[in-house]
Amino acid sequence: MIEKTRKIFEKPSRIFNKIFLNPFFYLLLFSLACLITLFSKEVIGAVGFVILICLALVLCEDILATTLPFMLLCVFITKCYNSFDTFIKFWWIAIPAVLSILFHFVIYSKKIQLGSTFYALIAVSAALMLGGIGTISAADYFRPVSLFYVVFLGVGMVVAYILLKSQMCVERDYDVRARLLAILYIAGLLACVMAFKGIYDSRGFILTYKKLSASIQLQAKNNLSTFLMFAIPCPFFFASKNRFHIVSPIIMFAAILLSQSRGGIIFGSLELLLCYILFAIIDKRNRYIYIIIATLAVFFAFYFSKDILRIVLRKKTFSSLISKDEDRYMLLTRAWEGYKQNSMFGHGLGYTGNTDLYSPKAGALTWYHMIIPQIVGSLGSIGILAYGYQLFVRARTIIKGMFTKDNILICALGMSYVGVLLMSQVNPGLFCPLPYSLITVIIFALIDGNTLKSNE
């Protein structure tokens, strides 16, 4: 039955692959996503994009046909903060979504491949399941929201790696890694559109009070900054072929500045500077351009540091960037207390003892909003070892890739991961299975081990 169905869809899937992966179709999707955000039609847009993804899963053998609509969907729904009650009304769409996923991975099944980063996912999965054992109550551990994060961050990412690596690492007439960079690039451009729209929507306040206050409209500033930090390294790869793309990282960083996300501005600056340094080393064609831009950027950053602090970050001194009265600061102490209480397994992801400092919205955990305290307090020594091992393996994979003929490509993918890792120091980040953790799994599924070979 499976083989017969596979033969029926063999020819149509080749046709739809070309349609869904065509650059003009990418432009159409990007335009639709821009219209959705410009006219604030995120809910109906989300339903439409999910249906489109379901169609791509059924009609296209190439799993990458689903990636751009998925990324654009993730970006424009960041505007829908605290919308659990809104989206739960569309629970029925989960049925065709699940059926489409099952159909795709059964009918278009490929040979399983495992790379060097796979076993670190196993270690992290074990740490997540063991988190809080001996300390956390059964009610907290088995809460639906707690189980969702434990399962999808752990076993879910293991399964995603196996399925997506088997699908993405097959012969194609294009380099799937370069295509992923293009998709992250396009998603970053959509995040720019949303950030600039936020400024436009705030124009009345800005003109009246002569203050930049994009945060009035940009509730999603941290999430948008995270997508932008995924995207910033991508243009550097394309700039190695066409210098037109050199301007894109500057536009993306400008969007982060306008968003007024403290984490985005601080760590986005660091990421962009690292990109200029690394690509100046490996991209000989644009080396001097990157050196000049980086030098000018550092000069202006120091020269206008007080203005940036006052106008963009709305602070009086650098020391006021972090206040001891902030809940996030006080959660550092709670993380250490959680570790001391159960140094082996922590108090678990589902722990609810910190709700006096942070009350989560529906569908969210009681976050620490910082990846290191989250690991230390929630998962204890086992978590520290598991995530430390994962960081080591991923760093080794990136470094090895940078000594291959595809070094510019691998560096761009690796720096995309570094971007979200940096942002995770002050946000849930990599503790969000969809989309951040999933994107990083896809990145490493493509660059670890045997996938360093170009498919071109």
Image (cartoon, rainbow, N blue to C red):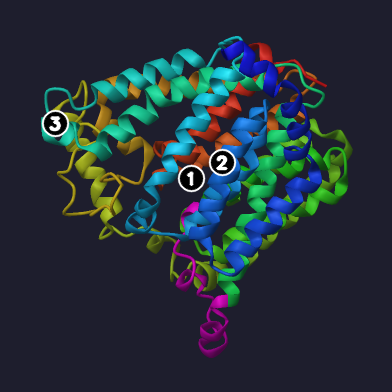
Q: Nearer the viewer, residue 103 or 88?
A: 103
Q: Position of residue 293 (x, y in %)?
A: 77, 52
| Numbered disc 3: secondary structure | loop
Q: Quadrant of the C terminus?
A: top right
Q: Nearer the viewer, residue 171 or 387?
A: 171
Residue 216 on the magenta span:
yes
Going 61% across and 9% down the picture, which residue do you hit?
Answer: 111
Tag 1 residue: 423
Going 56% across and 11% down the picture, which residue do you hit?
Answer: 114
Q: Position of residue 436 (x, y in %)?
A: 49, 39
Tag 2 residue: 419
| In front: label 1 or label 3 | 3
Amino acid type of the residue tagged 1 in the rendering? Met
Q: Residues within 10 Å of mark 3 (few under 14, many from 20)?
A: many
| Numbered disc 1: secondary structure | helix
Q: Nearer the viewer, residue 199 or 282?
A: 199
> Disc 2 and disc 3: Cα gap in Å?
32 Å
19 left or right of 263 in image: right
Residue 419 on the magenta span:
no
